Structures are given as C-alpha cells and as structure tokens.
Amino acid sequence: MITRKRPAAGACALLAALTAGIALPAGAVADEPTGAAPKVNLVLDVSGSMRARDIDGQTRMAAAKQAFNEVLDATPEEVQLGIRTLGANYRGDDRRTGCKDTEQLYPVGPLDRTEAKTAVATLSPTGWTPIGPALLKAADDLEGGEGSRRIVLISDGEDTCAPLDPCEVAREIAAKGIGLTIDTLGLVPNTKLRQQLSCIAEATGGTYTSVEHTDELADKVNQLVDRAADPVVTPVAVEGADACAKAPAVKSGLYTDREEFGQHRWYRVDLPAGSELRASVSVAADRRVDRDYGVTLRAVTSHGREIVRGESTGDGRTDVMSAGLRYPSAESDDDSGDEAATETVCLQVANSFSAAAGVKTTPGLPLELTVDVVDGPGTSSDVASFGLGRGWWLLGALVLTGFLAGVLWGWVSRWRITVWRTN
C-alpha cells in the first residue's frame, strides 16, 4: 500500500501525478493545441477602499496601476489579455445598482500596450465590491478558443453583494468543466479576506497570495500571466459509476470527475499480463467541511476481491486529500500473447468528508484520477510495492552478508588487541 498526504497547492492536475510518483504518459493528456492562444483576464477591485494609503507610502489604487503597467510591458506576445473592473463607476448607496458595477475595461484579445495603459490610468476608486458578479462576467469574457484560460482577481476587501457568494460562483464555474483557473491576490492581510479569496482560488485549482508591496504585486501577476502561456495538461472528463459492473473504462491518463459527500465512484482498467497499474486520486475540499475525513482508493477484481488500497486521513481544515496505489499483475504463462491474459481491475474512490452546517453539498467535490499502466517488474529480483514478493532471496543474501562481515570484523578486532597487548 502506498499512502500520500499533501498540503494545498495550485493546479490540481499535477497533484494527482505527483502523489503516485509517476510520470504522465504520452498521449494520455493533451498539451495546449498548436496555435491556441492562452487567455488571461485581470479583474481589479476599484472600490472606495482602494483609496487607502498603506502600500509603500501610496494608495492601493496607485500601487495597482504601477503594477499593471509593469505587467503590461512584460506580457508575452502570444497571450491574449483583458482587464475587467469591479466597483469602478457607481458612487451611490443603492445596493442593487452597486452590485451590477462591473465592466470590461479592455477586451480580451491581442494586447495593445499603450491602449491598455491608457485605460488603466483613468481608473479612480469609487464604489462597491461585487466580486461574485465580476467573476461571472469575467468567465464569459474568456469564452471561445482552445487555449488555457485564467482569471487573476486583485482585491483589498470582501464581497459586498451577498447572498451571491463568490465561493459558490467559483464552484459553479469549476463545475462547468471549462478548464478555467482563478488566482486571487489580497492587498490587505485580513483573515476574512484571506478566507474568501482562498476559497475562490481553491474551487478552480488556483492560488491565493497576500501581497503588501508594489513589487510583490507586479512580480506575482507577471508569474501568473507567464504561467498561462505555458503548455497545460488537460484532464479528460469522466463520470464514475456506482458499481464496478457499470464503471467506465479508463486507460493511462488524467481524468476529472465530481464526487458527492460520502459517495463511491468506480472506474475500470484493463491490465495486460506482466504490466503494472499505478493510480492516484486527489479529492479537493473546496468548501468548509467537518473535522475528521479521509480518502480511499481501492483496486478490486471484477469479482469484488480487494487487491490493494491506498488511503489518507485528516483532522482539521485541509485543501486536498490524496491517496495512491501500485499493483503488478501476474506474468502470463500463455506464449500466444492473446488478449485472454488481460486482467480487469476496478478502481473505487471513496471519501468520508461531510458538509458543515449551512454548506451546499452540490456540485460534488472536485476529483482527479491519474492512471498509468506500465511494463511490470519483469525480473524476480524486483520488490513489489506492497510487499517483498519474490525479493525474499535478495533480503536473505543481504542479511547473510552482513552477518559474515560482522563476524570477520570481530575476529580482526580481537587479533589486533591481542597483538597490541603482546607488544
């Protein structure tokens, strides 16, 4: 059994592969298609609180403008970039109007640096903080194309337009399966702001960062824009079944699904004789959950007999729970090499998360499954991942060698002492 537990991280896609310690196989996931331009939408909070003068002796708005100018200068040519604002126009007290105050300042597309800088220069801290509505519109701005899509949200305060919870908005965006990542940056070291921005980022596999200096803000936004231009791995959407017999067949690759609280999901893998199955799963707690939880990944025969399992448990707030396993199939005695030697292995993913009071249970928790079928050990000297198997003779040889070395060293030591005393 192999069990892994890891803290929060950025993109959930690589996390499953790292958990099992395996490389993603060629052809299992698709790199960004050639010619598919990555898209980034910078969403800037322009609410009244951005007038505060607490970032390197200047206002938060001035620091954001300076950082934006540096980012616009450094944006790679292949990135299509846009800028959306929230709270930039309405100065009144009508909440309904204030919560609609979001607009696309610069459209997502090929970047005209001079035009974009001019647009940013006109901004002045104004109104409300409609983060939820702005995220919905920002996602719409990024529609179309096959490249990676990323929203970078920069804010200094919590959303003021509840009950439209921005965390729920982020989960709805993630549930659409459109491969959009939301990264968040907080300009104030505030606990409530950190919790809200962290929740938004976690829902889509993004990152949260607290920044308190202008250079930190520019550096972090640059990193996120550059990351959008990197080749991406695209998980394949799959819907697990409630029983092994109904499970979808999966091959080597990276898969994404949703699993409700306490639900079991089944997937089926055909394992040729002499090969080895390596699998891992990561389930993200993208909302507030009760204490004491766990994730289990089981490999089971088509007849229901458990072969091996990996499991991980936690107590307290966590972002991702991961488990992995490895299973080498038996060598075939049939020299014909036909498909009859193929073994069907069912993978069961289970979780023991439970929702905290008042927390929505739908959509289900984000789940990512990595499957890799590789050539098996092939020699009797290899040791199986869940036991010594046929490697016992090697262990015995090492023990015997150590014993003989100890006896020889003891004899030499006694001889040297005897010679020293004689002299």
Image (spheres, rainbow, N blue to C red):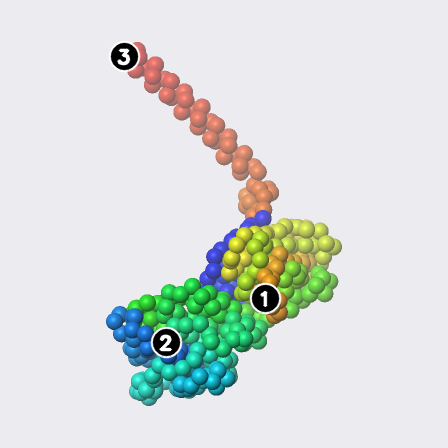
Question: How many C-alpha atoms fall within 10 Å of the one at disc 2: few (<14), some, or many (≥20)?
Answer: some
**On the image, which quarter does residue 28 sit in?**
bottom right
- Callout 3 amino acid: Asn
Q: Is residue 355 left or right of residue 51?
A: right
**Mark 3 crowd level (few <14, some 14–19, many ≥20, 10 Å Cα):** few
Question: Which residue is denoted by mark 1 in the rendering?
Answer: 359
Q: CA distance from mark 3 to mark 2?
A: 90 Å
At horizontal 41% and vertical 22% (from top left) the residue drawn is: 410
Numbered circle sitting on residue 63: none
> Can residue 404 be seen in the rendering of this structure?
yes
Looking at the image, can residue 312 be seen? no
- C-alpha distance separating marks 2 and 1: 29 Å
In the picture of the structure, the residue carrying the numbered disc 2 is 49
Local SS, label 2: helix
- Percent position of residue 122, x then y: 32, 87
Please state which of residues 283 and 200 is positioned toward the viewer in this rendering: 200
- Residue where numbered disc 3 is placed: 423
